[in-house]
Image: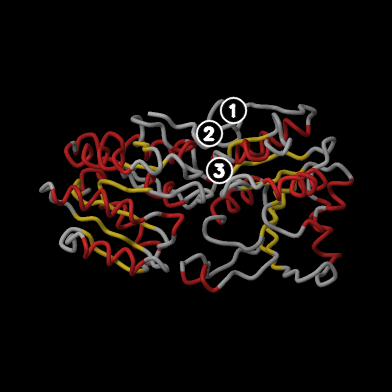
Amino acid sequence: MKIVLLSNYFNRHQMPLSDALFSLTDGNYSFISTTEMSEERRKLGYTIENIPDYVRNIEIKDADDFDRNECLKIIDDADVVIAGAAPEILLKKRISEKKLTFRYSERLLKKGKSVIKYLPRRFRFHRKNPKNAPIFLLCTSAYTAADYLSFGLFKNKAYKWGYFPKTIYYADINEILNKKDPAKIFWCGRFIDVKHPEAAVKAAARLRDEGFIFRLYFTGTGPKENEIKDEIKKRNAEDSIFFTGSISTVAVRDEMESSGIFLFTSDFGEGWGAVLNEAMNSGCAVIASHAAGATPYLVQNGENGLIYEFGNDEKLYEKLKYLLLNPKEQKRLGAAAYKTISEEWNAEIAAERFLNLTKSILNGKKNPYIYKNGPCSKAEILKNDWWKE
């Protein structure tokens, strides 16, 4: 089976899935990159030193500025194409010939539905995705299916998907859990509005004022960094909250492995949030905002992590306090979180399931749902207010 993944650029979050698909197809896999990675992403560690041979870089500036023969032949000859952010012209012929194609997409309505933009977007989306064409949706956000359905698209044709960063398989997860510091809290991301680091500061400062002893570490950089540091000073919490700056991906995982608790405070603008995968893989007890795209797929409240309703600072504070008071609960949740990633939500499982799903469709099943949970299972229609405690 020949598979092509078409996207803007190749990065470290896409490499594990690509490697798995390359292996399972005996080398019949290509990743086509159509743009240059931004300098901002490079600084955040998205680059890969040794690009695999299956990656083809074809920068497209306009409809006539690329090698049509090489690029289009790979796409047209594939049994299945997974299409992310890339020029639609690359898929035009394939879709007109009704060849199997999967869109993979984060949610469309991160900022809500605009009445002015609705009709033009609906027309554009339907033109790109003809109803009678074999086009399916891989949802890299738990809210993607609902957003597309609001435009009348992909009803009963949407599957759970996500981003699949490198999974670490520990010989004994209990060794990692036993080495963790239950008083160490970790937050990782860019300091931007979508991530809401201030929510973590408010909860931590309140607990510090109540006499709790802990260390909250912030890792990352961004335009809100100085604002967050000023907030910490204002709350006199410099002795409990620290900054590591921008560190390597290896160092991030080291920090996660030593932390008992991980805070994931993003709002609806967070398409997925791969740091959640990594924290759970590292056995952290996660406290995750319900609004981030990855949370409903990865976290089952009280089973492998805790979920709080975004914007409810009181609930975030209560859940953080609960975990600080209950180190054993941290371990229980951390062990379950690791199991979720190592046994279900990882690149190897996703690649294997995608091949099975593709074969089912090519064999004549129009809308097969062959998995009950996890990657390639049916994407439920979630709304922004699905989470009510």
* Residue 1 is at least partly visible in this image: no
Q: Earlier in the sequence, mark 2 or mark 3?
A: 3
Looking at the image, residue 132 lies above or below residue 223: above
Q: Is residue 216 left or right of residue 272?
A: left
Question: Could you say which is closer to the camera, residue 292 or residue 48?
Answer: 292
Question: Which residue is denoted by mark 2 in the rendering?
Answer: 374
Q: Which mark is residue 371?
A: 1
Residue that appears at 72% across and 28% down: 367
Expressed as whole percent of the image width and height from the top left, the position of residue 35 reads 67, 67
- Under circle 2, the secondary element is loop
CA distance for labels 1 and 3: 18 Å
CA distance for labels 2 and 3: 13 Å
Residue that appears at 39% across and 65% down: 224
| Residue sticking out furthest to the front | 116
CA distance for labels 1 and 2: 7 Å
Residue that appears at 55% across and 44% down: 162
Q: How many marks?
A: 3
Q: Which mark is residue 98?
A: none
Question: Which residue is denoted by mark 3 in the rendering?
Answer: 141
Q: Nearer the viewer, mark 1 or mark 3?
A: 3
Residue that appears at 80% across and 43% down: 126
- Under circle 1, the secondary element is loop
Q: Is residue 87 left or right of residue 369?
A: right
Callout 2 touching callout 3 (CB < 8 Å)? no
Callout 1 touching callout 2 (CB < 8 Å)? yes
